[in-house]
Image (spheres, grey):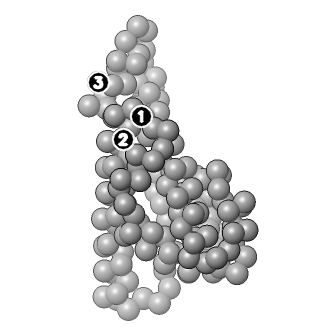
Amino acid sequence: MIESKAREKLSNKDFDSKQLSQQKSYLNKNFPKKLIDQFCDYLVQKTNNSSMKKSMKDKGSWTGLNKLLNGEENIKNVSSQAINKMFIEFLQEYDISKIYDSKVKDEISIVCYKLLIMELKAAAREIEKFVFEKERKTFNLTILK
């Protein structure tokens, strides 16, 4: 489905595998930004710390989130452990219908976003189970691209 949509976008051109790969990744390139913006709103709501909105909002990337999760960057008065725990909670509570609350109108992109969030939600469940079973007090998450 993704492959055919990408080929369709490139149909009038001669293209190589790199161009096809770029076109396929374009279909979900804004997913991290959208998800992190929503996580930022969640953090503001949970911590009543509206100052973090300026530092995080509209700067969402997996790299930036990973820096917060592993403590390389900090948010005033919020530990990296708290951010890790709140990110797991955020994913578990995430309502997939929020995907429609965006500028994304491409049907394939919407399907990609749904699949990505379902994978993240499943990962959050497994991490929560592991942390509980092993009685881990601290943990650091990393999002792999």
Q: Is residue 10 shown above or below 35?
A: above
Would residue 135 be found to the left or right of residue 66 on screen?
left
- The amino acid type of the residue labelled 2 equals Ile
Q: Helix, strand or loop at disc 3?
A: helix
The N terminus lies in quadrant: top left
In front here: 94 or 66?
94
**Among numbered discs 3 and 1, the one appearing first in the sequence:** 3
Which residue corresponds to mark 2?
Answer: 110
User: What's the mark number on residue 105?
Assistant: 1
Q: Mark 2: few, some, or many residues within 10 Å (few <14, many ≥20)?
A: some
- The amino acid type of the residue labelled 3 equals Ser
- The amino acid type of the residue labelled 1 equals Lys
Foreground mark, 2 or 1, reads: 1
- Residue 72 location (% of width, % of height): 67, 69
x 48%, y 60%: residue: 143
Q: Helix, strand or loop at disc 1?
A: loop
Q: Are marks 2 and 1 in contact (CB under 8 Å)?
A: yes
Q: Helix, strand or loop at disc 2?
A: helix
- Residue 37 location (% of width, % of height): 57, 56
**Among numbered discs 2 and 3, the one appearing first in the sequence:** 3
Residue farthest along the left direction in this orientation: 1
Is residue 70 at least partly visible in the picture?
A: no
Is residue 53 at least partly visible in the picture?
A: yes
User: What's the mark number on residue 4?
Assistant: 3
Q: Is residue 2 shown above or below 140?
A: above
Q: Mark 3: few, some, or many residues within 10 Å (few <14, many ≥20)?
A: few
- Separation of residues labelled 2 and 1 (CA atoms): 7 Å
Would residue 36 be found to the left or right of residue 76 on screen?
left
